[in-house]
Amino acid sequence: MEKLFQRHDEYLAVTPTDYVRDFMDIVDWNSRLLCIRGPKGVGKSTLILQRIKLNYTAGDRHILYCSADSGYFSNHTIIDTAEVFVRHGGTHLFIDEIHRYDKWSVEIKEIYDLFPKLHLVLSGSSLLALRSGMADLSRRMLIYDMPGLSFREYLRLTKVMDYPAVSLEELFARPEEICLDIREQCRPLEYFRNYLQAGYYPFYFEDSVAYAPRVENVVNYTIENELTSQCGVDVSNTRKIKALMQVLSGMLPFEVDVAKMSRNLGLQRLTVLQYLKHLEDAKLIRRLFSNLLTTGDLQKPDKILLDNPNLLYALCPSVPETGTVRETFFCNQLSSAGHRIEYGGMKNADFKIDGRYVIEVGGKDKGYSQIDVQEDGFIAADGIDTAVFRKIPLWVFGFLY
């Protein structure tokens, strides 16, 4: 146990607190059992360590942070560790990378039942492994999905400006005022292109030069390790899945032809649909449907985008299509802010948000023809820095969280 506390102190000593994401205030830290999950590299471990460092006294042995992938747990169980911790007065146990521990959900459930005064905070980056263990704890555990940085957070972290998040309703109600307020502090278009290429994952600020290879490593690790171990994907097909990711990164934003994908990859249609579902669960792609209420897990998606624009730039063999980048950014920011996104269709506007708002995404010269008859229709236009009528700058949708 003392070895764990030693590591706990070492982690806290090197944890920065000069920037803390607003996600910190979303989490109910008083819950007896909660889990923060999210893709590798979005900052879950840092957030947890900041919570400890900012709210507890250094050397307080009522608090313990540890990682389930530590060598300590090769010959110690989590439940035995929790028992010893509680016996010595421990009250708050933070376990990082929980998915690395075999049968973690069974032991966490037992700990929850045995020690009613112990608060447990878990985190994990294998969304697929976490998903498979959630059923046992669904009635006990609060779950939080942590996204990467929004454009607003990126600007704050680069010390360009600090502006509060706005709700989508507020943005549609007074877009001109919000855009002017932001422009008084900076020129967003000056930084927007860089964010689209490298700014979603916080590790950009650790090493900007090696950023793209690190993003690609996240993708490769997810496909080679998590899809094979958690989803039963045949190892021999991982190269085909990587090829699929590259194809998607270079696509124009159009409707999906699964039959063509199947032929090109040499895979059965149902297998391709299963792989697409796994990739979405791992936060590598986003499947879009015209009606989410009637959508099944293995239904053919109407449209496919990568999860965020940084993946496009890291994986695309050439320069990604501008329209694809725009739509990927828009869907990522809206989804990360908790909004429901549906595909609008080829003849209608690009997207329907929360079953109400109709949004067409395009360049600064995009016309209003596709939203003219829509009471809640708007254009998210790239290349402009202020709102005009129902045309709103694309970048300001990055201020929703």
Image (spheres, rainbow, N blue to C red):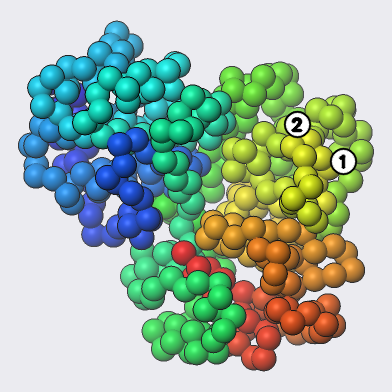
Q: Is residue 346 above or below residue 203?
A: below
Q: Is residue 273 above or below residue 18?
A: above
Res 1 visible? no
Picture coordinates of residue 256, whole percent (x, y): 85, 49
Q: Where does label 1 land, which residue? A: 258
Using the image, tell me which numbered label, if any, was put on residue 187.
Answer: none
Q: Residue at coordinates 92% horizontally, 38% vertically from top-left? A: 259
Q: Give the number of the mark in front: 1 or 2.
A: 2
Picture coordinates of residue 369, whole percent (x, y): 85, 83
Residue 57, image quadrant: top left
| 366 or 317, nearer to the observer | 366
Q: Is residue 245 above or below residue 240?
A: below
Tag 2: residue type?
A: Gln
Dot 1: element? helix
| Spatial separation of the CA atoms under disc 1 and disc 2 | 11 Å
Q: Is residue 267 left or right of residue 331?
A: right
Tag 1: residue type?
A: Val
- Sequence order check: which comes first, mark 1 or mark 2? 1
Q: Residue at coordinates 55% horizontally, 57% vertically from top-left? A: 338
Residue 4, image quadrant: top left
Q: Where does label 2 land, which residue? A: 274
Picture coordinates of residue 14, whole percent (x, y): 20, 43
Dot 2: element? helix
Q: Is residue 32 above or below residue 15?
A: above
